């Protein structure tokens, strides 16, 4: 089993889950531009330092390829704008070529950003999105949209077995403190007694899925016969103001709300329709926010 982006936050948890499920071997492939070898705490996880924008050579048989390789936060894909577009295009093609050469099944990690700033809520997989192709988030959004088209073409034209997941906000231990996403930002501010930075009026919504639930959805999808996109996320929606208060309560600290201008194209709503996941995979999130935040905050106390 090969996990591209396996040294990242989500990838490292997926590697551990695969070993727990009895995988004979798990190889994490990563160029470490946003991941870290420190995330690979289980010594049984193999590691290959490699940029998947170059062709991928793996010795021996491979049954499954998970492609999680990509910067995934606005902070990262702003500073790594070209790398983000390359990994979503060339990197995805190389992942598909690896799967094809090994006659393996490949799962593409896509994103809720496919939907852009949605005009409907919750967002079902059939919604075609409202994406600005020339905006500041386009390097990520359009790379992921291209990746979906490429995966679909390899499936339909070349017969590669593919799976496609649209991941909504995921959180948990091993997130980078400086990755710019709201969970590590709010938790760090709470633990330091700083003000919570809220963009806009704080009424924009997000939904937060704990990493163990997210990984369970990825594994179920990979093992299923579903080749169309599937949303995996938590449908419990909350405003940024509500989330700041949830973090304050869980961490036992934090200052006042400090408002800043809303970035261009920042989505006003984000809530997955998980009907397809429930009906086809028997999946739904099980970890409530208070429990997930407790585990996440316990981890961040060790790094703040």
Image (tube, rainbow, N blue to C red):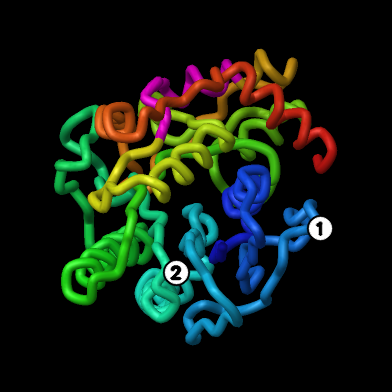
Q: Which residues are magenta?
A: 233-246
* Residue 243 is one of the magenta-drawn residues: yes
Q: Residue at x 82, y 43 (%)?
A: 303
How many marks can you see?
Answer: 2
Q: Between tags 2 and 1, which lies in front?
A: 1
3 left or right of 273 in image? right
Q: Say which quadrant the C terminus sits in.
A: top right
In the rendered structure, which disc, 2 or 1, sits on the residue that comes first in sequence?
A: 1
Residue 131 showing in the rendered view? yes
Q: Residue at x 45, y 38 (%)?
A: 217
> How far across and how far down the image is residue 207, in percent?
42, 29
* Residue 294 is one of the magenta-drawn residues: no
**Real-space Cα separation, disc 2 to disc 1, in angstroms:** 29 Å
Report the residue that reaches farthest toward the right. 302
> How far across and how far down the image is residue 122, in percent?
24, 28
Give the quarter of the image for residue 132: bottom left
> Vertically, is 283 above or below 217?
above
> How far across and how far down the image is residue 242, in percent?
49, 17
Identify the residue position indicated by label 2 in the image. 84
Residue 70 showing in the rendered view? no
69 left or right of 37 in image? left
> How far across and how far down the image is residue 89, in percent?
35, 74
Q: Residue at x 44, y 69 (%)?
A: 84
Nearer the observer, 191 or 147? 147
Identify the residue position indicated by label 1 in the image. 43
């Amino acid at each position: 089993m090969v996990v591209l982006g396996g040294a990242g936050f989500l990838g490292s948890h997926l590697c551990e889950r695969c070993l727990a499920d009895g995988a004979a071997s798990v190889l994490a492939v990563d160029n470490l531009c946003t991941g870290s070898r420190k995330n690979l705490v289980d010594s049984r996880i193999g590691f290959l330092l490699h940029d998947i924008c170059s062709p991928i050579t793996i010795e021996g048989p491979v049954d499954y390829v998970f492609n999680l390789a990509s910067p995934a936060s606005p902070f990262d894909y702003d500073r790594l704008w070209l790398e983000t577009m390359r990994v979503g295009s060339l990197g995805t093609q190389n992942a598909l070529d690896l799967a094809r050469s090994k006659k393996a099944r490949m799962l593409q990690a896509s994103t809720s950003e496919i939907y852009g700033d949605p005009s409907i809520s919750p967002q079902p997989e059939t919604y075609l999105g409202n994406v600005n192709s020339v905006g500041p988030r386009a390097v990520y959004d359009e790379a992921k949209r291209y990746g979906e088209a490429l995966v679909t073409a390899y499936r339909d034209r070349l017969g590669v077995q593919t799976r496609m997941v649209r991941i909504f906000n995921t959180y948990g231990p091993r997130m980078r403190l400086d990755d710019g996403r709201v969970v590590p930002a709010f938790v760090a501010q709470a633990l330091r007694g700083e003000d919570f930075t809220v963009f806009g009026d704080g009424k924009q919504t997000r939904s937060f899925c704990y990493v163990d639930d997210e990984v369970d959805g990825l594994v179920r999808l990979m093992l299923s016969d579903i080749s169309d996109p599937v949303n995996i996320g938590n449908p419990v929606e909350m405003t940024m103001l509500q989330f700041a208060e949830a973090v304050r309560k869980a961490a036992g600290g934090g200052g006042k709300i400090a408002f800043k201008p809303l970035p261009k194209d920042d989505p006003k709503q984000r809530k997955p329709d998980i009907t397809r996941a429930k009906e086809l995979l028997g999946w739904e999130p099980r970890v409530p926010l208070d429990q997930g935040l407790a585990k996440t905050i316990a981890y961040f106390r060790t790094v703040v």
